[in-house]
Image: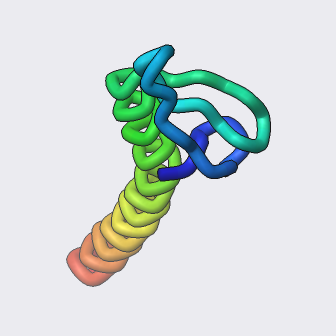
Amino acid sequence: MNCPECAGELKYDRNRRSYVCTRCGATWKREELDEAHEKLLDEIYGGFDEKKDEKAKRQKEYLDWWVSKEKKK
């Protein structure tokens, strides 16, 4: 498992009952890690969905324009 802050390796510390990053020293509870990883995935894959939606919107606008042009003939 990697640190959401710096992508360093996380080690479990039994005394703290949390994960500690070996690179930046950040500490994370399991729930915090799950939330941080979900947020990162949403940011990464959410951007792809927005780009797909924008492309689909442009295609639909073009088709609507083309159909309206054909109807005027």
View extreme (front): residue: 15
Q: Residue at x 36, y 27 (%)?
A: 30
Q: Position of residue 8 (x, y in %)?
A: 68, 49
Q: Nearer the viewer, residue 14 or 23?
A: 14
Q: Nearer the viewer, residue 36 or 73?
A: 36
Q: Is residue 19 above or below residue 1?
A: above
Q: Position of residue 37 (x, y in %)?
A: 44, 41
Q: Is residue 21 above or below residue 15?
A: below
View extreme (top): residue: 16
- The structure's colour scheme is rainbow
Q: Is residue 25 left or right of residue 49?
A: right
View extreme (left): residue: 71
Q: Nearer the viewer, residue 14 or 32?
A: 14
Q: Position of residue 9 (x, y in %)?
A: 62, 50
Q: Is residue 53 above or below residue 33?
A: below
Q: Is residue 50 above or below residue 24?
A: below
Image quarter where the C terminus lies is: bottom left
Number of numbered discs overlaid on the protein picture = 0
Q: Residue at x 71, y 42 (%)?
A: 22
View extreme (right): residue: 24
Q: Nearer the viewer, residue 43 or 15?
A: 15
Residue 61, image quadrant: bottom left
Q: Residue at x 41, y 44 (%)?
A: 42
Q: Residue at x 40, y 65 (%)?
A: 52
